[in-house]
Image (spheres, rainbow, N blue to C red):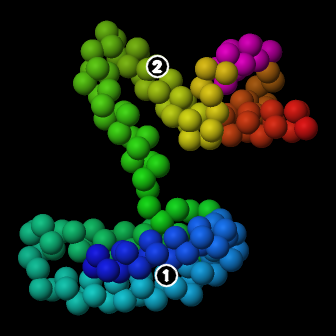
Amino acid sequence: MLDSILALYRVEHEALQAGVVRTLAHRALRQNKSRPVLESLHTYLTEQKPLHLPKGPMGQAIAYALNQWETLCRFVDDERLPLGNNRSEAALRKAALGRKNFLFVGHEAAGENLAGLYALVATCEANGINPETYLADLLLRVQTHPNSRLDELLPHEWKRLRAADSS
């Protein structure tokens, strides 16, 4: 299993070294090299499933992997998707660290507001936007911005439009 996972990451490293990450060449590399590894891994998991108790740790892990198989393999056909979810995990780690603090915000509505603000800041960071700059601009624009174009104020669109304005 670990050798298979290592082989998948080696394909990603090869794409990085070749400078083809998130291109059609990256997709082709994944389809040629990662897909056979995944097929072999699927066969192995299918063979192993009856050898483990369904409620045991290994049986549950195998069942979970097989139930999520389509989602797990989606990266092979979409060069924009990363192999792993390290960025997502890192973003969630911040929320997990603050979870105890969020229990005592004083009021349920305050907790919902804090969660929304937290998600907005995390979205800014994921899009390479300074949250403070974004929020300062957003607060100035939101009062006069047409309701029909509110999607322009979402972080990824805001960034795209600012880049277009500056060029």
Q: Would residue 142 be seen by someone viewing this image from the given angle?
A: no
Instruction: Give how far across and how far down residue 153 sits, in percent.
Output: 72, 30
Query: Which residue is under mark 2?
Result: 113
| Callout in the foreground (2, 1) | 1
Instruction: Give how far across and how far down residue 53 sits, in percent.
Output: 8, 76
The residue lying at 23 percent from left, 90 percent from top is 47
Q: Residue 76 shows which numbered tag?
A: none
Look at the numbered disc 1 and give the secondary structure of its residue. helix
**154 or 2, nearer to the observer:** 2
* Residue extending farthest top: 106
Q: Residue 34 shows which numbered tag?
A: 1
Look at the numbered disc 2 and give the secondary structure of its residue. helix
Instruction: Give how far across and how far down residue 166 sits, in percent.
Output: 88, 33
Q: Earlier in the sequence, mark 2 or mark 1?
A: 1
**20 or 76, nearer to the observer:** 20
The residue lying at 51 percent from left, 34 percent from top is 122
The C terminus lies in quadrant = top right
The N terminus lies in quadrant = bottom left
Residue type at the position of mark 1: Ser
Secondary structure mainly formed by the magenta segment: helix
**79 or 10, nearer to the observer:** 10
The residue lying at 60 percent from left, 70 percent from top is 17
Q: Quadrant of residue 96?
A: top left
Q: Is residue 143 magenta?
A: yes
Q: Which residues are magenta?
A: 134-144
Residue type at the position of mark 2: Asn
Q: How many other residues sit within 10 Å of disc 2, few (<14), some (14-19) or many (≥20)?
A: few
Relative horizontal placement of residue 142, taking residue 4 as reference (left or right): right
Instruction: Give how far across and how far down residue 98 sits, in percent.
Output: 32, 26
The residue lying at 32 percent from left, 80 percent from top is 3
